[in-house]
Image: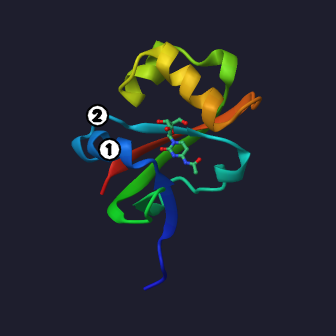
Protein backbone atom coordinates (compact mmCIF):
# COMPACT_ATOMS: atom_id res chain seq x y z
CA UNK A 1 0.00 0.00 0.00
CA UNK A 2 1.34 3.45 -0.87
CA UNK A 3 1.89 5.75 2.09
CA UNK A 4 -0.82 8.30 2.78
CA UNK A 5 -0.10 11.96 2.22
CA UNK A 6 0.65 13.61 5.57
CA UNK A 7 -0.90 16.75 7.06
CA UNK A 8 -0.34 18.22 10.50
CA UNK A 9 -2.55 20.20 12.85
CA UNK A 10 -1.72 22.05 16.04
CA UNK A 11 -2.41 19.60 18.84
CA UNK A 12 -4.97 21.92 20.41
CA UNK A 13 -7.32 21.08 17.51
CA UNK A 14 -7.10 17.31 17.95
CA UNK A 15 -10.25 17.04 20.04
CA UNK A 16 -12.32 19.19 17.66
CA UNK A 17 -11.20 17.14 14.68
CA UNK A 18 -11.93 13.80 16.35
CA UNK A 19 -15.37 14.94 17.53
CA UNK A 20 -16.30 16.27 14.09
CA UNK A 21 -16.64 19.85 15.39
CA UNK A 22 -13.89 21.10 13.04
CA UNK A 23 -14.50 20.21 9.41
CA UNK A 24 -12.26 22.62 7.50
CA UNK A 25 -8.74 23.93 7.69
CA UNK A 26 -7.43 27.08 6.04
CA UNK A 27 -3.92 26.81 4.63
CA UNK A 28 -1.62 28.79 2.39
CA UNK A 29 -0.35 27.97 -1.09
CA UNK A 30 2.27 25.55 0.28
CA UNK A 31 -0.55 23.22 1.38
CA UNK A 32 -2.93 23.63 -1.55
CA UNK A 33 -1.62 20.50 -3.28
CA UNK A 34 -3.99 17.97 -1.75
CA UNK A 35 -6.33 16.11 -4.08
CA UNK A 36 -10.09 15.89 -3.64
CA UNK A 37 -11.00 12.39 -2.51
CA UNK A 38 -7.58 11.50 -1.17
CA UNK A 39 -7.03 10.26 2.36
CA UNK A 40 -4.54 12.13 4.54
CA UNK A 41 -2.66 10.88 7.55
CA UNK A 42 -3.09 13.41 10.36
CA UNK A 43 -0.46 14.12 13.01
CA UNK A 44 0.15 16.80 15.57
CA UNK A 45 2.43 19.59 14.45
CA UNK A 46 4.27 19.74 17.78
CA UNK A 47 5.32 16.12 18.27
CA UNK A 48 4.32 14.46 15.00
CA UNK A 49 1.99 12.05 16.76
CA UNK A 50 -0.52 10.39 14.39
CA UNK A 51 -4.11 10.70 15.58
CA UNK A 52 -6.47 10.00 12.65
CA UNK A 53 -7.00 9.85 8.92
CA UNK A 54 -9.20 12.32 7.06
CA UNK A 55 -10.62 12.40 3.57
CA UNK A 56 -10.37 15.57 1.49
CA UNK A 57 -13.87 16.55 0.36
CA UNK A 58 -12.97 19.77 -1.46
CA UNK A 59 -10.31 22.45 -1.83
CA UNK A 60 -11.41 25.99 -2.58
CA UNK A 61 -9.58 29.27 -2.86
CA UNK A 62 -10.70 31.79 -0.28
CA UNK A 63 -9.22 35.23 0.32
CA UNK A 64 -8.54 36.31 3.89
CA UNK A 65 -10.98 39.23 3.53
CA UNK A 66 -13.73 36.82 2.40
CA UNK A 67 -13.68 34.79 5.61
CA UNK A 68 -17.10 34.81 7.24
CA UNK A 69 -19.14 33.14 9.96
CA UNK A 70 -19.65 30.01 7.84
CA UNK A 71 -15.91 29.41 7.83
CA UNK A 72 -15.70 30.18 11.54
CA UNK A 73 -18.51 27.74 12.32
CA UNK A 74 -16.73 24.98 10.44
CA UNK A 75 -13.57 25.80 12.40
CA UNK A 76 -15.59 25.71 15.62
CA UNK A 77 -14.45 29.17 16.74
CA UNK A 78 -15.64 32.78 16.55
CA UNK A 79 -14.70 34.66 13.37
CA UNK A 80 -12.49 37.21 15.13
CA UNK A 81 -10.53 34.39 16.77
CA UNK A 82 -10.14 32.60 13.43
CA UNK A 83 -8.87 35.76 11.76
CA UNK A 84 -6.30 36.52 14.42
CA UNK A 85 -5.16 32.89 14.40
CA UNK A 86 -4.59 33.00 10.65
CA UNK A 87 -2.72 36.29 10.94
CA UNK A 88 -0.41 34.61 13.46
CA UNK A 89 0.15 31.46 11.40
CA UNK A 90 0.26 33.17 7.99
CA UNK A 91 1.27 36.82 8.53
CA UNK A 92 0.53 38.97 5.48
CA UNK A 93 -0.99 36.12 3.45
CA UNK A 94 -4.20 37.07 1.61
CA UNK A 95 -4.70 33.98 -0.57
CA UNK A 96 -5.83 31.00 1.47
CA UNK A 97 -7.24 27.59 0.60
CA UNK A 98 -10.19 26.03 2.39
CA UNK A 99 -9.71 22.30 2.74
CA UNK A 100 -12.96 20.60 3.67
CA UNK A 101 -12.56 17.15 5.19
CA UNK A 102 -14.32 14.32 6.96
CA UNK A 103 -13.00 11.73 9.38
CA UNK A 104 -12.24 8.36 7.87
C1 LIG B 1 2.37 24.02 10.11
C2 LIG B 1 1.03 24.63 9.99
O1 LIG B 1 0.85 25.62 9.33
N1 LIG B 1 0.04 24.05 10.69
C3 LIG B 1 -1.26 24.42 10.83
C4 LIG B 1 -1.86 25.47 10.11
C5 LIG B 1 -3.17 25.75 10.34
N2 LIG B 1 -3.87 25.01 11.25
C6 LIG B 1 -5.26 25.31 11.53
O2 LIG B 1 -6.05 25.50 10.37
C7 LIG B 1 -7.00 26.53 10.61
C8 LIG B 1 -6.80 27.75 9.80
O3 LIG B 1 -5.48 28.11 9.65
C9 LIG B 1 -6.90 26.86 12.03
O4 LIG B 1 -7.72 26.01 12.74
C10 LIG B 1 -5.41 26.59 12.22
O5 LIG B 1 -5.00 26.50 13.47
C11 LIG B 1 -3.26 24.00 11.96
O6 LIG B 1 -3.88 23.33 12.81
N3 LIG B 1 -1.97 23.71 11.72
The answer to which of 56 and 24 lies nearer the viewer is 24
Calculate the distance from the C-alpha at mark 1 to the C-alpha at mark 2. 6 Å
Tell me if 90 is positioned left or right of 98 in this view.
right
Residue 27, placed above or below residue 70 = below
Q: Look at mark 1 in the image and give the residue it sits on.
A: 17
Residue drawn where x is 35% and y is 26% of the image: 76
Residue placed furthest toward the bottom: 1
- The circle on residue 99 is none
Quadrant location, the C terminus:
bottom left
Disc 2 residue crowd, few under 14, some 14–19, many 20+, Cα 10 Å: some
Horizontal and vertical percent for residue 6? 51, 65
Residue 29 percent across, percent down from the top left? 72, 45
Residue 25 % position (x, y): 50, 39
Q: Which residue appears farthest toward the left when viewing the image?
A: 19
Residue 38 rendering spot, x and y as whole percentages = 48, 61
Depth check: 96 or 45 in front?
45
Helix, strand or loop at mark 1: helix
Q: Residue at x 45, y 37 (%)?
A: 24
Q: Which residue is mark 2?
A: 21
54 w.r.t. 18: above or below? below
Element type where label 2 sits in the image: loop
Determine whether label 1 and label 2 are within 8 Å by CB: yes
Q: Quadrant of the N terminus?
A: bottom left
Q: Residue at x 45, y 18 (%)?
A: 70
In the rendered view, tell whether residue 56 sits above or below residue 63.
Answer: below
> In the drawing, does residue 95 fall left or right of residue 38?
right
Amino acid sequence: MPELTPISFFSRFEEDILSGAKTITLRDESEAHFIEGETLSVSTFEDERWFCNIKVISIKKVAFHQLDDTHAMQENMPLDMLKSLIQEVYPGVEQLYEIKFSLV
